[in-house]
Amino acid sequence: MQISPDILFSIGGFSVTNTVVATLITDVVIIVLVMLVAKKVSLKPKGVQNAVEAIIDYFRETTETIAGNRASFIYPWVVSFFLFIVISNLVAQIPGFESIRFHSLSSGEHGVPLLRAATSDLNLTLALAVTSVVTTHFLSIKHTGVKGYLTRFFSFKMFPVFLFVGALEFVNEIAKFISFSFRLFGNIFAGEKVMATMYGMCSFGLPLPFIALELMVALIQAIVFAMLTMAFMHIMTEQSH
């Protein structure tokens, strides 16, 4: 299993990889989930609606505890990141990922995996990181003002101490792109490597404990990404003193 995703075919110069196909499957699952919940909305939730409402309520209450009234515009982002990442991670645990092969003129004798976890593609995790960080800064400017936003990075009080601290803050913001993307990518990619090794050694029995571990990692990584986004949005939208 290589780090970069495998190209299945091209459409108008756009390369369709196995992680792109997995992302589309994730999108379909989310759309179907939304339609199921919307179709059976009731005052006494049960089944899928109950599970979805429990997740939304958890993140809303947690965000309200941390960010107060700013939760109204923070928690929708947090929930969106969580749902997309956790569903993407869980979909990758469906039998067939990495084992179903796709054959083309350039794929070689053994072909390439038709499906691969979307979050094992650094392109996707980097896109999620960019979305999270850029949105955080946009909300910071919107709710603290341009002056309040800039004073986080440029301040001449206690010169040059605060100016140095501001420079460190700027470096920290750049580092978020790396930490967000590589943390998620690394954990999911490593998990797929482990599962491929276990299935190669024994198709029955041996992989079961690792499947349970991967399910736990899938959930934890989604929670970590969502919670870090929540924390950073809370910090960046708080009025500085």
Image (cartoon, rainbow, N blue to C red):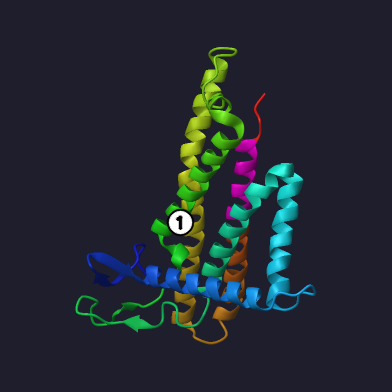
Residue 94 image position (x, y, % from top left) = 52, 79
Report the residue at 53% width, 76% height from top: 93
Q: Specify whether 157 is left or right of 48.
A: left
Residue farthest toward the right in the current orientation of the protein: 44
Residue at the farthest bottom position: 204
92 displayed left or right of 10:
right
Q: Main secondary structure of the magenta part?
A: helix
**Is any atom of residue 178 visible in this view?**
yes
Q: Nearer the viewer, residue 141 or 8?
A: 141
| Residue 90 rendering spot, x and y as whole percentages | 56, 72
On the rendered image, what quadrant is the N terminus found in? bottom left
The magenta span reads 224-237
Q: Amino acid at mark 1?
A: Thr
Asked if the magenta segment contains residue 217, the reply would be no
* Image-based side of 7 in relation to 94, left or right: left
Q: Residue at x 68, y 78 (%)?
A: 40
Examine the rendering and report whether any part of residue 194 can be seen.
Answer: no
Q: Identify whether 216 is placed above or below 76.
A: below
Q: Position of residue 67 (x, y in %)?
A: 71, 43
The number of callouts visible is 1
Label 1, secondary structure: give it. helix
Residue 3 in the image: state x and y as whole percent. Answer: 36, 62
Nearer the observer, 51 or 217: 51
The answer to whether residue 229 is above or below residue 157 is below
Crowding at dot 1, Cα within 10 Å, few <14 / some 14-19 / many 20+, comes out as many
Hey, which quadrant is residue 105 in on the image?
bottom left
Residue at 38% from the left image edge and 68% from the top image edge: 20
Q: Which residue is mark 1?
A: 125
Quadrant of the image for the C terminus? top right
